[in-house]
Amino acid sequence: MAGPVFIRHPRPGDEAELVALRRASREFLEPWEPIPPAGTDGFDEVAFARMLAASDTERSQRVLVCRAADRRIVGQASLGEIIRGSLEQAFLGYWVGAPFARQGFMTAAIRLVLARAFGPLRLHRVEANIQPHNAASIALARRVGMRKEGFSPRYLRIRGAWTDHERWAVTAEDWGAG
């Protein structure tokens, strides 16, 4: 643990800490997050159980971002919808709790996630879809070596509205060259 954070898969014992962080960060996170399945909150124990079940599968890798200094959970990152075969791609998602924003934790974490994606997971491409007005997330994508590849109108439903997104991506070759 040489950097400011480390990543690990969640465990059942993380529920209280993670749910508390998400609830405390609700106002900070809601403008950027997709609507959870009908009848669910996205900030509760049911959401934690869904995340835990998808944390280490062939199609999904979800990790907690923990501050190295005190092992406290500061956020989460995921490689979702992993596609194998001729594509070898995943979609990158991430969030940081409001008390930990703009401290470099997520940049360090995403570098670790990408190292795992292009190392042990042997992916070729990782894509992140970011709302055009999410300046912090776009800056993070640039810092970790992603490039803007395009624009997707009405890509994802956020807070009840189909929202435009920019497509950012990095390939194994780009990562290795950086």
Image (cartoon, rainbow, N blue to C red):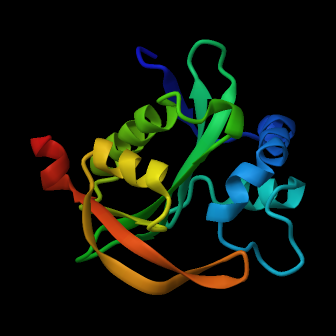
Please report the residue visible at 14 percent of the width from the left and 40 percent of the height from the top. Answer: 178
Query: Can you give x and y, in whole percent of width and height, for residue 153 in the image?
Result: 44, 87
Please report the residue visible at 86 percent of the width from the left and 60 percent of the height from the top. Answer: 46
Please report the residue visible at 36 percent of the width from the left and 43 percent of the height from the top. Answer: 116
Q: How many marks?
A: 0
Q: Nearer the viewer, residue 97 or 119?
A: 97
Q: Residue furthest left?
A: 177
Q: Quadrant of residue 11?
A: top right
Q: Is residue 159 above or below residue 45?
A: below
Query: Can you give x and y, in whole percent of width and height, for residue 58 in the image?
Result: 49, 63
Q: Is residue 63 above or below residue 36?
A: above
Q: Nearer the viewer, residue 37 or 56?
A: 37
Position of residue 61 in the picture relative to residue 70 (left or right): left
Please report the residue visible at 85 percent of the width from the left and 40 percent of the height from the top. Answer: 20
Can residue 162 be seen here? The reply is yes
Query: Can you give x and y, in whole percent of width and height, for residue 34 in the image?
Result: 66, 71
Q: Nearer the viewer, residue 21 or 49?
A: 21
Q: Quadrant of residue 10?
A: top right
Query: Can you give x and y, in whole percent of width and height, for residue 5 in the image?
Result: 51, 25
Q: Is residue 14 above or below residue 138?
A: above
Position of residue 150 in the picture relative to residue 40 (left or right): left
Can residue 83 be seen here? The reply is no
